[in-house]
Each structure stands twice: as structure tokens, then as C-alpha cells.
Image: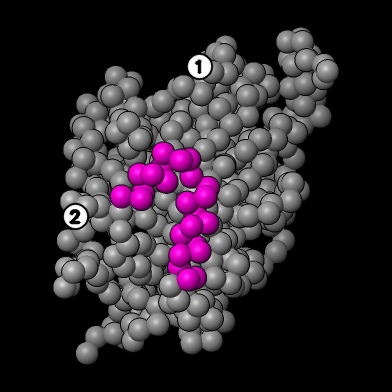
Amino acid sequence: MAKVKSSDSLRESPVMARRQVPRREQTSIGKVDRNPVELLEINSAGRIERLVPLRYGRMIESPFAFYRGSAIIQAHDLAGTPNSGLTLQICGDCHLANFGGFATPERALLFDLNDFDETSPGPWEWDLKRLTASFVVAARHLNHKRGVAEDLVRKVVSSYQTRMAGYAEMGILDIWYERITFDRLLEELTLPEARKRVQRGMERASSRTSEALLPKLSEHVGERWIIRDAPPAIFHPGTANTLISKEDDWTLRAKTRDSVDKVYNDYLSTLSSDRRELLSNFTSQDTAFKVVGVGSVGTRCLIHLMVDRQGKPLFLQVKQASESVVARYFKSPAIEHEGQRVVEGQRLMQAASDPFLGWTKGALGRHFYVRQLRDMKVSASVELMDAPLLGEYAALCGWVLARAHAKASGKAREISDYIGRGDPMADAMVKYSDGYADQVERDYAIFVAACRSGRLEARTDVDMAADFRV
């Protein structure tokens, strides 16, 4: 029988970690003697060639848009920084825009992390650093003063620190049952405007369903619902509107009924029996390609429309999963299926997950994961927030991240003991985030120059849409 560590021994490891990696050493911005363009090109390899310029076109909008789409660069840089040695399942792309509201299977509205494409085992500091740096990059983009950016970082870290200390005193089952609902947010938030925005979010979420989405994305033709093409955002592979080259065999094989059935049945096998039974009440209507996000542009992403016997719709999103940027630079156990990695990481970190979350393989063996599209999902518009509202949001993100790390790892005590109760960790994150935001701006300038020189091609959505106008 394996030995169970005593509470004393559990408390000793963070003390040793602080001796080996003092918190003041967390200020290093890492291995930045590299070409960011080369890393982006590595990350774009294997994507749909005609969509890569759209990815760059979305990234070129601002340093913050660039930051959102360049997780590989920061993962590379973080690999050259010291860490506490406390490894757990991390988000891997924990910037401020990857938090939002969504409905649980019981239809409660939660606020949580909502993007796990890069999830993988890694140092918990990597998530915290990507989050705090994102607030500084965003604050600069929004023309806030330097003091505002520093205050945002301190709010993230203080919230993470306080909440983690609380989770360190809780039993692991209590942590697993912990949910940050919108009702709790209304009680916790101090600014009237923040509470007003949460209430608006709750109202918006109730209307963001598959049924509301149906007439916006599709039309009834004969006996079926057909998804409308709106290239470059939405199109059907193998048609005049496609952005996938004829050389990509995926467009040909995906058309065959046997291939589609196998992909769907493989997905069903990853669900519980009650979810499979539920989906058996739906019939397939149509499938189309849908471009999403910033960093994901160019990966293969489909939406699949189904309806039940009453004609009520369900939209599923089938999204390609590739190697995590964290796993590329931090040694992790071998992964057999990248879609499974995303699903299991999401289930570990979220308080509650999509009931239709599963994984499958495509016609050419590519890995995908499946989830609902837009089911009561809402996100914060940070561009419309003043400094006090951003501060409330920063504290909320710190709370969410602490809960996710505590649930996924069972190491709340060790993380809390490493952080301590004073300001050293916050001081270190302020210095790291300010320094890394400087680096992001330098990398962004290099990226823009590469686009202007023709090394990289960047095109906007409007520019690409014009290609399809008659």
C-alpha cells in the first residue's frame, strides 16, 4: 500500500520550493531570444492554407489581438523561466478573454474558464502569468495609465491568493462541488455597474440558444434545414464557397456517408449512455465549416445541425485538436488523442461541463472534440469597461483560476503555502507582466513588419468576404 503523506510533509514541500525558486525569481520573462514569426509559422503548419491569412488578419488588429493568437510564443518563453515545481492540469491559454458564462446541464449559469484547446499538465504559474500579462497588454491597448495596469495585476494575484488560501482549508469534495454562479457574483461584486452587467449577461444568456441561432444561421429548404454560407466565416466544404483546397483529401472523404457515420459513432462512444440515448432523438440536417476565434483560425472546425421530432434544433461544434503549446515546451505524458486531452482537461478544470462534450477522429485520422455551439454562452466586453470595472473583472478571473487549479490538482495547500500571505508574489507578477507586455509589443512590431514585407499574408474578414461577392 502506498504511503499517505502527513499534513506536515505536505506543508514542507512548498517551503522547499520557495527556497529553490524564491518568488522574486518569478519575474523572469524567459527565453525571448527567438523570432516570433518563426514560432507563428510553426503554429500555422497543417492548418487550412487559405485561412492562415485570416488568422494573421485578426491578429494584426492590435497587440492584444496578437497576444490572444500567439499562445505558442509565451509557452516557448515560459519554458525558460523558473517554476515552483508544482505541476497540475493547466488551461494553457489563460488570457482574460477566455473566461465567460455558460449553462450547466441543470441550466444554472456559471462563470468559468471556457477555452481548453491548450490544456495540459504544466506549472500553475504559467496560467497565472498569461492571465496577469493579458491584463497589462489589454490595459495598454485601452490607453489606461500605467498605475491601472499594475492595479489590475495586483487584483488578479490578490484574488487568486485569497481564494486559494480558502480552498486550502476545504475538503476536496467541497472544492469539486464549488461553483461560481451568476447569482453568487451578484452577491460578491461591489460596484453597482458590475452587478448591472451581470444581470444583463443573465438576460442575454437566456436568449443564446440553439433555437435562437437556427434562423440566424440556417434556412428551411424542402424537408431539411440548411446552414447558410457566409464566407469566410461559414461555408460548405466542396462547394464554390469553400476555402479548402482540392488537394485536401478531407473535403472529399468527409462527403461520404460511411465516413460521416463513423466520425459520429466514434464521438457517441465517448459519451455516457444517457447522452447517447438523448442524441438518438435527433436527426442530422446539415454540416458546414465555421471559422472561430483568433488563435484557432485555420484549424478545422465544423458545425453540425440536428433537430428533434418537434423540429427543435441542436447545434454541435466539431473542432480540431492539435498538440498543446504547453506540451510542446513542457515535458508531459504522451497523448494518444488530442481531442480526449481537451475534453478531460476541461472536465478536470471546469466546475461543470457541456453534457455533449466528447471526442472523435476525422476521415484522415485528425483529432477532434465536440461540444454544443453557443449554448447560453456569454463573454465580457472588456473594451467597454472603465478601470474600476476592469478591477472587478480581474478579481473575478483570479477567483475562477484559483478554483480551477484547486479542483484539477488537489494541491490548494501547496500552492497557497508557496504564494504565502504577503505581497512578494504580487510584486513579482507586476514586474513579470510589465516586462512581458513590453516583449509582446516588440513581437507585435516584428509581426506587423513581416506582414508588410510579404513574408506573412494578413487579410481581414471584410477583405476575404469581398472575394465571394458577385
Q: Report which residue position mark 1 lands on.
A: 174
Determine the image quadrant of residue 152. top left
Give the residue at x 45% y 76%.
Answer: 256
Question: Is residue 271 one of those drawn in magenta?
Answer: yes
Indicate the amino acid at tag 2: Gly
Q: Report which residue position mark 2 lands on.
A: 311
Tell me how far mark 1 sits from mark 2, CA to CA. 40 Å
The image quadrant where one finds the N terminus is top right
Give 189 or 35, whichever is nearer the viewer.
189
Give 331 or 272, whichever is nearer the viewer.
272
Q: Secondary structure at mark 1?
A: helix
- Report the span colored magenta: 258-281
Give the residue at x 63% y 24%.
Answer: 410
Indicate the amino acid at tag 1: Asp
- Residue 290 % position (x, y): 37, 66
Give 252 or 181, whichever is nearer the viewer.
252
- Residue 435 % position (x, y): 60, 47
Q: Secondary structure at mark 2?
A: loop
Residue 147 in sight here: no
Question: Is residue 180 one of those drawn in magenta?
Answer: no
- Residue 366 % position (x, y): 58, 66
Give the residue at x 19% y 55%.
Answer: 311
